[in-house]
Amino acid sequence: MKYALLGSVCLILVLAFVFGSNYYKEQQSKKYGFMAEENAELFVRDHSATLGSEDAKVYIVEFMDPACETCAAFAPFVKQIMAANPGKIKLVIRYAPFHDGADNFVKILEAARMQGKYWETLDVMFKSQNVWASHHNYQPERLWEVLPRAGVDIEQIKKDMHDPAIAKIIEQDIADVKALNVQKTPGYFVNGKPLQVFGYRQLQQLIQSELDAKYPN
């Protein structure tokens, strides 16, 4: 009788876990159903930094590395496209820390988010790459020299960047990088569709095709 009861409890717990997992995926699919119905959670996590309207129907998911020169080069281009299509596009930032020491750069960025200075800090990091990450000549200590331009508390960042929650964000994003087979940065997906051939024109065409599909009028 005791073993039967224990077995029933275990079964209930397993079913509850399965139901909870499926419910979460279903809710994610409903929220991002226009992107990738079965794998929406791989593209957008609850922790993901986003820019743009909540009502946008076109999601640009970018797997990036703050030390990536190409990521820095493409950032203004993506913002220009967003500005030209107000309210229609949402940018989602995911991490693919492929460069040496990139984990620490991501931790600094996430620590800045705790101060409400995420996008300002990312902008400063990109614009000052020639100072601290020029052509893979990493001098991370010089990043501290330029970060005050973002209006952040440097000492607080140095404390917050070691928060275990940030390490978990990086761990999850790396797992999604592997699941989606992202090989290099920046890695773009537009409504779940990967950018097959990399380039400014190709990215613009992919975004425009989704804009045309989601906003036919």
Image (cartoon, rainbow, N blue to C red):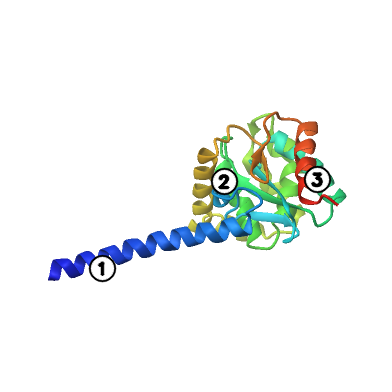
Q: Which residue is mark 1?
A: 9
As shown in the figure, which amino acid type bears the numbered disc 3?
Answer: Asp
**In this rendering, position of residue 199 left or right of residue 94:** right
As shown in the figure, which amino acid type bears the numbered disc 2?
Answer: Asn
Q: Residue at x 13, y 70 (%)?
A: 2
As shown in the figure, which amino acid type bears the numbered disc 1?
Answer: Val
* Vertical side of 13 occupied by 180: above or below: above
For the residues bearing labels 3 and 2, Cβ distance under 8 angstroms: no
Dot 1 or dot 2, earlier in sequence: 1
* Crowd rating for badge 3 (residues with CA inside 10 Å; few <14, some 14–19, many 20+): few
Dot 3 or dot 2, earlier in sequence: 2
**In this rendering, position of residue 1 left or right of residue 99:** left
Question: Dot 3 lies on which element?
Answer: helix
* Crowd rating for badge 1 (residues with CA inside 10 Å; few <14, some 14–19, many 20+): few
Q: Quadrant of the N terminus?
A: bottom left
Q: Which residue is mark 2?
A: 104
Q: CA distance from mark 3 to mark 1?
A: 52 Å
